[in-house]
Image (cartoon, helix red, strand yellow):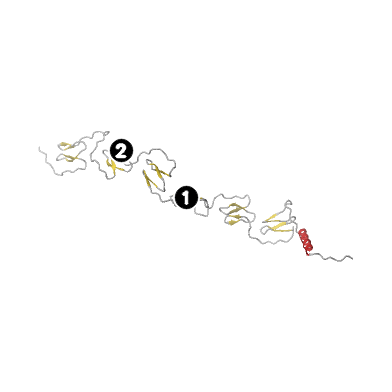
């Protein structure tokens, strides 16, 4: 009789792995396996509890508890099992093919960000305030320091933030080197008789259409309009006023310039 040879430990382990593989076969991906929540049932099994991903043999007992959803991450939320994320910015989940809003939800305020002399576009951040440079979050940004620029007078406007005056007649400011319109804008100063004062000037004599700089000397003469008809000379008692004068004292026949001084005495006319 041949002597009995006991199984070695290695042989026993291999035998146990073989029986385990036979008892729990790996499902064939081409065998029409059933999806059960986040799991896939083995061949011949059915899904008895989708929320928990539990598969059993047909007719076998099944636990009925409801397991928390383990669906895909969707923005600030987590979708339930069987749902899909249709709008990540708002965290909205729907069944596959369900209706979904296309709105964009922003977690940050939508107000534009002030960045030195500029204003950043929505979604950008101010990366260099001294230069007024905006970039997308995490974008490259220069660390140079831009000194404060003096304001420049440009017609009726004032250029700020390093801009230059490219068209004084229109008051247009641009960044250095940028294109500029060559159009000429007519002055829009104060109306002065038949003339229009230039920017920065004031009307000192409307009858003559004379404009001067503020506080400069101005003639007080009265100019007659060339196009206007000659005004009728006013009769003033025994007198006739000169053109441009008014009768201030009819009893005495005294004429003066409009608003001029006038005596209030009463003259007795000789018969």
What residue did someone put label 1 on?
A: 133
Secondary structure of residue under mark 1: strand
Q: Which one is in front, 267 or 162?
A: 162
Which label belongs to residue 252?
A: none
The outermost residue toward the front is 144
The outermost residue toward the right is 1
Q: Residues within 10 Å of mark 2 (few under 14, many from 20)?
A: some
Q: Residue at x 47, y 50 (%)?
A: 133
- Viewed as shown, does residue 79 lie left or right of 107? right
Coordinates of residue 164 in the picture (x, y in percent): 40, 44
- Considering only order in the chain, which callout, 2 or 1, is on the residue closer to the N terminus? 1
Rendered view: 19 above or below 100: below
| Disc 1 to disc 2, C-alpha distance | 46 Å
Rendered view: 212 above or below 9: above
Coordinates of residue 18 in the picture (x, y in percent): 78, 59
Q: Evaluate if marks 1 and 2 touch, with contact meaning CB atoms under 8 Å apart.
A: no
Secondary structure of residue under mark 2: strand
Coordinates of residue 128 in the picture (x, y in percent): 47, 52
Which label belongs to residue 195?
A: 2
């Amino acid at each position: 009789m041949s002597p009995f040879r006991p199984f070695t430990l290695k042989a026993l382990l291999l035998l146990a792995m073989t029986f385990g593989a036979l008892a729990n076969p790996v499902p064939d991906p081409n065998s029409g396996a059933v999806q059960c929540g986040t799991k896939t049932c083995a061949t011949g099994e059915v899904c008895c509890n989708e929320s928990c991903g539990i598969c059993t043999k047909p007719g076998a007992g099944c636990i009925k508890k409801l397991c928390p959803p383990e669906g895909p991450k969707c923005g600030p939320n987590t979708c339930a099992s069987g749902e899909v994320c249709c709008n990540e910015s708002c965290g909205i989940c729907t069944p596959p093919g369900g209706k979904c809003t296309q709105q964009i939800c922003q977690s940050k305020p939508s107000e534009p960000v002030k960045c030195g002399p500029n204003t950043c576009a929505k979604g950008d951040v101010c990366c260099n305030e001294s230069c007024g440079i905006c970039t997308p979050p995490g974008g490259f940004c220069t660390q140079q320091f831009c000194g404060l620029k003096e304001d420049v007078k440009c017609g009726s406007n004032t250029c700020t933030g390093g801009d230059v005056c490219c068209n004084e007649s229109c008051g247009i400011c641009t960044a250095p080197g940028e294109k500029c319109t060559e159009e000429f804008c007519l002055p829009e100063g104060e109306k002065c008789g038949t003339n229009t004062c230039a920017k920065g000037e004031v009307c000192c004599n409307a009858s003559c259409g004379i404009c001067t700089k503020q506080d400069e000397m101005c003639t007080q003469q009265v100019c007659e309009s060339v196009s206007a008809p000659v005004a009728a000379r006013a009769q003033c008692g025994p007198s006739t006023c000169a053109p441009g004068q008014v009768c201030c004292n009819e009893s005495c026949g005294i004429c003066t310039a409009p608003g001029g001084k006038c005596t209030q005495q009463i003259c007795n006319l000789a018969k």
